[in-house]
Image (spheres, rainbow, N blue to C red):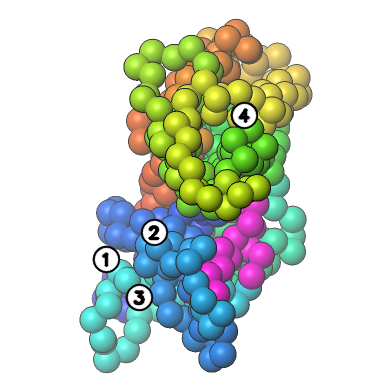
Amino acid sequence: MGLFSFLTQEIAIDLGTANTIIIHNDKIVVDEPSIVAIDRKTEKLIAIGTQAKQMHGKTHENIKTIRPLRDGVIADFNASELMIRGMIKMISPKSRLFSPSLKMVVCIPSGSTEVEIRAVRDSSEHAGAREVYLIFEPMAAAIGIGIDVEAPEGNMVVDIGGGTTEIAVIALGGIVCNKSLRIAGDDFTDDIQEYMRHQHNVKIGERTAEEIKIHVGAALPDIEDAPSDYTVKGPHQMTALPIEIPVSHQEIAHCLDKSITKIEAAILQVLEETPPELYADIYEKGIYLAGGGALLRGLDKRLSDKHNIPVHVAEDPLHAVARGTGIALKNVDKFQFLMK
């Protein structure tokens, strides 16, 4: 520790479409939904994270809720800056005589364009960061899962987040081939909303669709320990009268089928591009699943049956990317070559 180390605050940020996680001193200090509530008249921040999510879909004309990230990239520059700044304040809310300079490692989708990378860098700098390092999500996920990314062996990581699904083959500390697919948790939520509208004639919001996904979400109709049906309450589309509909995991498996098929096709595409020696390693070791989408019941079995390769779900898939970003922050010098 240097003499002036207390003047620098080191943080790792997993800036996700659905959730933003901040790691400081090897601990998860912030784990909040990526959403802000703003006053339309003054453009001032009203709420952030969980508080703002509770307002989502329930606001009046003076308040707007914004999800600053779409498909894993910044869609609203101003809102993302307010969100990053607000979440950093959550780490040390006590007022200080001076605010320390920030050193940040932020993870980004592997398919990010130069413009999207610049947007993340600018947002971080505007939020007070002196040094900003960017690391690709599949690489961070691999480090977080505990894979030795520098070994001369092939490892395949599939990170299904809120906005993107990141598929990458990693060897010798680099990404050999990858695909960033803009089909992930948010699309599953949209599929559920559409299914409920077409199949049951009931209108539901984003939050209710998310609840359905968590309670009865499944990738296969036949799964062990099947969850009990989830009751959905909402207005009938034709009559506007309230109705209650029980939803089963079989229905959700059916309605998510199309999106999951696209993820399967993308995995196959990356496997096709993989050099044969690395393919052999993956066939032996299996595919690693991370991200919130990895929690979908039966997804590992479905992918394993489809590709004839074992599939392992990371120990704590929701925080694998954040953990990897935290490890990269601690070893910035060692992982310098992985960062942008």
Q: Residues within 10 Å of mark 2 (few under 14, many from 20)?
A: some
The amino acid on which the numbered mark 4 sits, given as a three-letter code, is Cys
Query: Mark 2–mark 3 contact, CB under 8 Å?
Result: no
**Which one is nearer the viewer's eye here, 255 or 153?**
255
Q: Which residue is mark 2?
A: 32
User: Between marks 2 and 4, how big is the CA–CA gap?
Assistant: 28 Å
Expressed as whole percent of the image width and height from the top left, the position of residue 17 reads 55, 54
Asked whether the viewer can see residue 181, the reply is yes
Residue depicted at x 27% and y 74%: 92
Percent x, y of residue 233? 45, 45
Task: Identify the image quadrant of the C terminus.
Answer: bottom right
Kindly indicate whether the residue at mark 4 contacts the one at mark 1 (C-beta within 8 angstroms).
Answer: no
Earlier-in-chain disc, 2 versus 4? 2
Q: Tell me how far mark 4 sits from mark 3, CA to CA.
A: 40 Å
Residue holding disc 3: 89
Of the image marks 1 and 2, the number of the one nearer the N terminus: 1
Query: Helix, strand or loop at disc 3?
Result: helix
Which residue position is annotated with label 1? Answer: 1
In the image, what residue type sits under mark 2? Answer: Glu
Foreground mark, 1 or 2?
Answer: 2
What's drawn in magenta, residue-wise?
Answer: 64-76
